[in-house]
Amino acid sequence: MSDFTSLPDLALRSNRASVIAASDESFEERENLINPWEPRFSPETFGPKGQEYDGWETRRHRGPGHDWAIIRLGMPGVIRGVVVDTAWFKGNYPPHISVEACRVHGHPSVADLEAAEWVDVVPQSAIGGDAKHEFPVSDERIFTHVRLNMLPDGGIARLRVHGDVVPDPALLTGLTVDLAALDNGARTVACSNWFYSAPDNMLSPGLARNQAEGWETARRRDGGNDWATVRLAAQGFPDLIELDTTNLLFNAPGATRVLGIDHQGDEPLPPIDDPAWFELLPRTTLQPDTPHRFRLSGARRPITHVHADIYPDGGIARLRILGALTPAAETALSSRWSERPAS
């Protein structure tokens, strides 16, 4: 897979995205395009419309035109790459696709989006059946919606739109926010182990519905401990830490410790034993299947990253760092949001 596939999927249903309109969905519903699981298939499973597929499938075109679907990104951002997956569609996939994108503020209707200025992020491209097709994107603009075009018709199992989250500063400035939220632009930048599930999961929106929707490591046998380092959405003052072990009944960590650092620039983070790191939460016992909340005391210090140790291993459903942005961070986010680079 390409490097961009490690970035958050801006179009994932569990990241609050939605397929808000489609030209046709005669065979299979448009909403399937952004389901978080891998496409499934059961042969010879026939419903009233024919073989059932885990994807979006339109009727056969008998005239001009083509089919399309509009997706509202759950997290606005800069698109780094698109994956069009035709899994299980072997004789009914579209021969070509294209992807357009636009940026519209607020909560636009379908009519508003039809009148928007759309730009190509993936030009018309040939694709095949039962395969994942990766398309890198080089446009540096911030987008809020994409339109997937099937030329002329057929079935697509999944659409993935990977990129860098760029939050709207109007929803963050002057408020207490989750500095570690994926949808605010936070990311895991280092992790000791993600055997069962990725550490970015614990930064995802909403509550984890099961243990697979959090971060979970393999069983550790070397006497050490697992850990994850998170780059926050922006520099901020932390006030409360939440470590949620919900759904982790027999594989929650026995304890945790959380450190913070204010690290500006592009230089690598210093090692954890460097005095620039300081303790936000000392080693503290955790319970299984429990949301733990810890209000921080002492002088407020700005941080840009947190390092969470878990002892010795296990899983965390969600990590939240509640606090306020610093004035410098508010200025930087506002500047980024207002940028309009040329395509």
Image: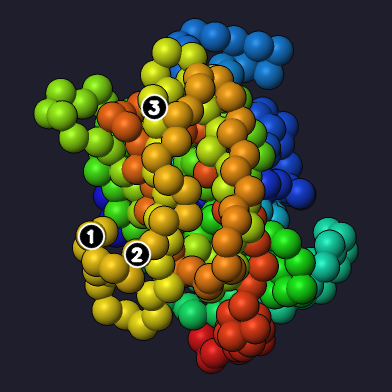
228 w.r.t. 341: above or below: above
x and y percentages locating residue 184 in the rendered image: 60, 61
At label 2, which amino acid type do we have?
Trp
At label 1, which amino acid type do we have?
Asp
User: SS of the residue at dot 2?
Assistant: loop
User: SS of the residue at dot 3?
Assistant: loop
Indicate the colouring scheme. Answer: rainbow
Q: Marks 2 and 1: CB-CB under 8 Å?
A: yes
Residue at figure coordinates x 53%, y 71% from the top left: 301
The answer to whether 302 appears left or right of 189 in the picture is: right
Number of other residues with Cα within 10 Å of mark 3, as a class: few under 14, some 14 to 19, many 20 or more = many
Residue tagged by mark 2?
277
The answer to whether 333 appears left or right of 266 in the picture is: right
Give residue 253's mark: 3
Number of other residues with Cα within 10 Å of mark 1, as a class: few under 14, some 14 to 19, many 20 or more = few
Residue at figure coordinates x 51%, y 33% from the top left: 317
x and y percentages locating residue 28 in the rendered image: 65, 29
